[in-house]
Image (tube, rainbow, N blue to C red):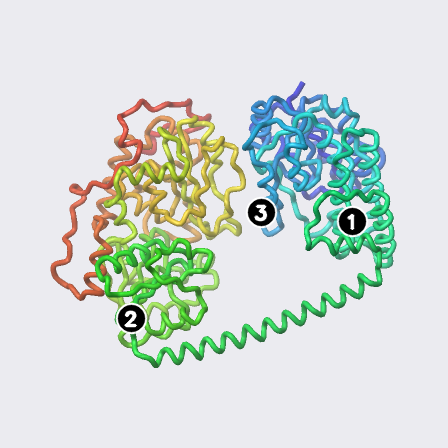
Amino acid sequence: MPRFSVIVPAYKVQAYLHECLESVLEQSYPDLELIAVDDCSPDACGAIIDEFAARDSRVRAVHLTENVGLGRARNAGLKHATGDYLVFLDSDDTLTPDALRAIADRLKETSEPDVLVYDYARTYWSGEAVRNQFAVQLTEEGPAPFRLDDRPGLLRVLMVVWNKAYRREFVEREGFTFPAGYYEDTPWTYPVLMSAETIATLDRVCVHYRQRRHGSILGTSSVKHFDIFGQYDRVFAHIDTHPELSHWRPVLFRRMIDHFSNVFLKPGRLPRGSRADFLRKSRSHYRRYRTPGAPVRLRTRVRHALVRLGAYRSYRLLSFLSRAHKRTVRLATALLRTARGGALQLHYRVQLRLPLRADRAVFSSYWGRGHGCNPGALETAFRTYAPGVRTAWIAHPEHHHTIPASTRRLAPGTAGYWTALARSKYLVNNVNFDRRLVKRPGQIMIQTQHGTPLKFMGLDLQDRPAAARDTDFAELLRSVDKWDYCLSANRHSTLVWERVFPAGFTTLEYGLPRNDVFQQATSADVTRLRQSLGIPEGAVAVLYAPTYRDYRRTQRRPLDLERVLRQLGPRFVVLTRAHHSYEAPLTSSAGGRLIDVSDHPSIESLCLASDALITDYSSLMFDYAGLDRPIVVHADDWEAYEAARGTYFDLRAFPPGAVARSEDELIDIFATGHWRGSRSVQLRAAFRERFCPYDDGRAAERVVRRVVLGETAGLPPFIPLAERHPVPSAVAARPTEPVATVPAPGGAVPLTEHL
């Protein structure tokens, strides 16, 4: 008897069926049977199913002699199911990697519930994936298993059959089957959830729900959408035969009306001439099943009134007035935006004629994000070493909470923003300011940069169209011409910046201000940061920070972090930091050991809290090397990355630590202890000597003394590498412990070949 029976009905989905079936058979949890039902499909679906059945004994091909529809095709699959649990999957959707293993683990943790509800993400033809907006309802916190009465919010999650696993014995005992027609999930999911004695949740995306451009049944105009009325008749009939469920009638009534109004208002679903009839039937069901008691939000009351009254002519009039109102609002908004923009530019021109304020400095970083990076460290240094200069920070309002209380907050595009740009003597940024900025005589612009360049930058991107995209290089150089100073962390950076950004600026080879904290922080700071992030005491915290891939249309993390953590065991915790262009991680089934820190405002704090860094080609490795903590490079796609973006040296030949060319090798590096072995220490020492000569904790002080106070002599001397003592990691601060090892994954290459 297999653990799972995965039932996949197929009809006219030949373009997607291979991917769907492969996603099941390639699961890391192999204890399954795949029941693929050919619903008399006129295309190649039947042949594809037979091909899979011929090559894998776990596949059972079921061919129907006539097309019976999705619900009855699932029933046909149910007759052949022998697994402990039933999992339904639509033939154009896919299971995510390791989904069944995560489901099996959660079923075991929650004592084999009748139903397990897991999450999904909508995937689009563009490659975008968007997680279910009600994922919060799937939290694993609190007692489990439970009944629906304990967690009624589960009904807000999409009521479909394929985001749940069902104990087969429970389904057979209750006699649940699917009806014919559209919306066949409705009379299955509601009765199942209401009748289940035990329910559990899994806060993990297990299904990718494909959003097809064309061909979706529910997106097709058809009178079959009228089937929805019969489906809700079946739901209420189930309640009538089970009086103990009658307290759910108010909720189901409200859900039914929401569903009716959604179908009615969705463009293209109902054929021309049928909308009035649909509204009349909706009104009839409203009166038949009306059960007050469930709260209705104000914005949905209009929809409910539409169904209750069934007044189609009134609806058309209201729709016309609504469209006219929206057009009027859009036009007025556009006119106001144009007028406001013109007024602000006039205001800016006036401010440009007023005297500069020598005691003002304005800062920003990463196109209006919060206080941080090199500009953040410099802003703090301005207040410390030049207290007579008043500072302001430009950021979008949602980031204002990161700005120190003593610093003025400015939002981009406001009158205060333009005033600050026009009259502040000092302008500091790690990217370029608004291209409309006019650099005035007497203004001083400091370009801090935001790291040491491994990948091509500036003019070097002219021959790299995948990376350059639509860069206007002439506009770029006009912005560079406004720089007075450019900060550099090392000689390598200096040579690159002066060549790829040719202009008359002065390079300040003082180190990067944001790295000062690595030499100034204490062990108490490290402990506090780890506690704030929820890192368990005694755990090895690994910061994972991948960079952007120019050759990919969509950005996904290259590593399966759940698998990595399973292999390494409970001692390890991963702090995952997505590049700002990446999607936030969609899955988390590692029992709290995978911590998403993508939105954390300070990368420096994350570095201090961690014990090691895993990255690929991110410039963060150059900063992290200043901490003198282990770094592991995951270079599984170096050739593709180098071809698309271009790099200034071969990182594999001069790395800051161990190099893994695959996920298995990465696991092996940590499992065997090579991540902090003697060879890794040697590689890191050579890397630090080349790229961290000036990051001694006083870079920001040197910049302020030179640029603001005018000191050219007597600046703080650089502390040699051998005399620096960056704060140790939590692991390094503890007595040496034996490293728990696990067998290297099959096929992993011995590390001695790389190190």
Which amino acid lies under the numbered mark 1 shown in the image of this protein? Phe
Q: Is residue 343 left or right of residue 159?
A: left
- Give above or below for 659 relative to 702: above
Q: Is residue 338 left or right of residue 218?
A: left
Residue 143: image quadrant is top right
Name the mark nearer the viewer: 3 or 1: 1
Q: Tell me the element at label 2.
A: strand
Q: Nearer the viewer, residue 637 or 172?
A: 172
Residue located beneath label 1 in the image: 260
Location of the N terminus by quadrant is: top right
Give x and y (percent) for residue 162.
68, 36
Q: Is residue 175 left or right of residue 20?
A: right
- Give above or below for 437 relative to 288: below
| Residue in the picture at 35% in, 40% down | 529
Marks 3,2: beta carbons within 8 A: no
- Give above or below for 549 relative to 391: above
Q: Which mark is residue 425?
A: 2
